[in-house]
Amino acid sequence: MMRRKLLIIILLLSSFASSVSARVLPAEPPFNRLRFTAEWGYTQCAFLYRDYNFISEEGYRVFDRSHGFDWHANAHFMAYLGYPLSARSVLSLGVGYMGVGRDNRLLPVTLRYDFHPHTFHEDGIFYFAQGGTAWHIHTTAGQMALHATAGCGYRFRLCDDCALDLLVGLKYLRDHPALSDPERAGNVSEHNIRKNVAGYCALDISVAISF
């Protein structure tokens, strides 16, 4: 269900991007239009929802369903390759590293859409939305995570082909993390897990260089 919703969101973003009637880009080879962005940031996890259900080694069922504030700080790094759809909108594919929550490190792949009310060559505020999947660095139950972020930023033009961006976004991550075994050292065996869902809400603050 979550993957279907994420696919619908990506399709809607792509449809909206293609319909933006912004200024026409100058005629030039498509390769010359590519934009590269390197982004470094701070992630402050604020809320965690958990719903676990597994069979213990002794054979009894363990349930854990809870939610509440969960304050953990992490870092993230992303590299994006973008293609301008118009003078005001850019569609990018990104890969990188991010941490969310306690001991939760992932390698995300992200599709991102930026909208600049003026043009991406000018100073000023802009808006972005992105979503994708992520693979765990540490051993887990073997499932990928889904993530989405929406927010805004401000662009400072440094020169003709380079800009500094400051960004703030609200992130949601739906995950299937490893479960610590309550009876012995290590994690619960994958074949004993019946349900394993965690949802994280976090605030991203980052700085990026685009050229």
Image (cartoon, rainbow, N blue to C red):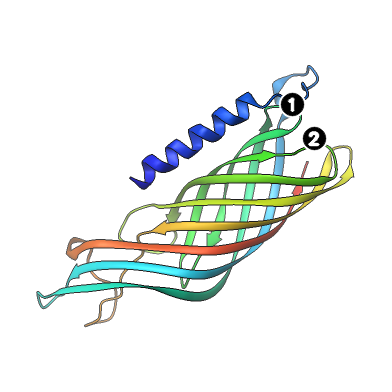
Q: Is residue 102 left or right of residue 203?
A: left
Gap in Å between the C-alphas at discs 1 and 2? Answer: 9 Å
Residue at x 47% of width, y 73% of height: 102
Q: State the image coordinates of residue 140 (x, y, percent, origin top left).
A: 34, 62
Residue at x 69% of width, y 59% of height: 206
Q: State the image coordinates of residue 77 (x, y, percent, origin top left).
A: 62, 57
Q: Is residue 41 left or right of residue 103?
A: right
Q: Residue furthest left?
A: 59
Q: Amino acid at mark 2?
A: Thr
Label 2 Cα neighbours within 10 Å, binned few <14 / some 14-19 / many ≥20: some
Quarter of the view holding residue 8: top left
Q: Amino acid at mark 1?
A: Ala
Q: Quadrant of the N terminus?
A: top left
Mark 1 sits on what residue? 22
117 lies above or below 158: above
Mark 2 sits on what residue? 119
Asked if the residue at tag 2 contacts the one at tag 1, i.e. Cβ–Cβ closer than 8 Å, the answer is yes
Please report whichever mark, 1 or 2, sits nearer to the chain's N-terminal start. Answer: 1
On the question of residue 140 being in view, the answer is: no
Front position in the image: 137 or 112: 112
Q: Quadrant of the C terminus?
A: top right
Q: State the image coordinates of residue 158 (x, y, percent, origin top left).
A: 88, 47
Residue at x 78% of width, y 16% of height: 27
Residue at x 55% of width, y 35% of height: 13
Label 1 Cα neighbours within 10 Å, binned few <14 / some 14-19 / many ≥20: some
Front position in the image: 5 or 99: 5
Q: Secondary structure at mark 1?
A: loop
Q: Secondary structure at mark 2?
A: loop
